[in-house]
Image (tube, helix red, strand yellow):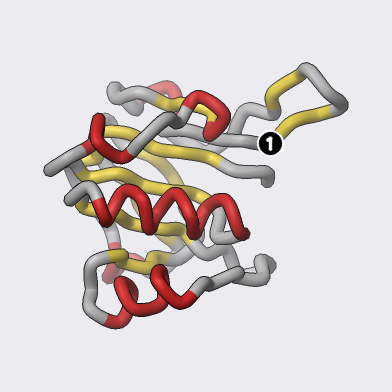
Amino acid sequence: MAHSGYRGNAEAIHPRFSGLEKFREPIIHASAYKSGVDYKGKNVLVVGCGNSGMEMSLDLSDHNAIDFIVVRTNENASVDVGALAKIRKGKIKVVPAIESLTSGGARFVDPSTNLHAGIATVIFFPL
């Protein structure tokens, strides 16, 4: 898991979700993200769909990660042409806001999209 929110110039804003303490996989700040090559074949949940979130999702998909991007209800998506094409092909899967995390998955506000297991990393952006 990664996130990119900052308070001021130095303090990273860490996500607060129900079940966060149960999630066993990495939770990283987006500033630590280097390349999608490290995530090839892994399920990655990107939380935030602004410019950086979309660019990161596109990079993950280009490196054959299984990419899920969370679009919260109060968020304006910023979709570039490459990411939009991948969303349309199902290479980037759009999921709703997170309700809670589990030991290796996520529950969303729309239960039909729940990921019960297999999330390797979550990447967070400003909340």
92 or 34: nearer the viewer: 34
Q: Which residue is mark 1?
A: 5
In the rendered structure, the answer to whether residue 7 lies left or right of residue 44 reads right
Q: Residue, x 43% and y 22% (percent of image)?
A: 21
Q: Position of residue 54 (x, y in %)?
A: 49, 59
Q: Position of residue 117 (x, y in %)?
A: 17, 42
In the rendered structure, the answer to whether residue 6 lies left or right of residue 108 reads right
Q: Residue, x 23% and y 79% (percent of image)?
A: 89
93 or 82: nearer the viewer: 82
Q: Is residue 12 above or below residue 41?
A: above
Q: Quadrant of the N terminus?
A: top left
Q: Residue, x 66% and y 71% (percent of image)?
A: 76
Residue at the bottom extreme of this rendering: 88
Residue at the top extreme of this rendering: 10
Q: Is residue 110 above or below residue 32?
A: below
Q: Position of residue 91 (x, y in %)?
A: 23, 67
Which quadrant of the figure has residue 122?
Answer: top left
Residue at the left extreme of this rendering: 41
Is label 1 in a helix, a strand or a loop?
Answer: loop
Amino acid at the residue labelled 1: Gly
Q: Residue, x 34% and y 27% (percent of image)?
A: 23
Q: Position of residue 62 (x, y in %)?
A: 26, 55
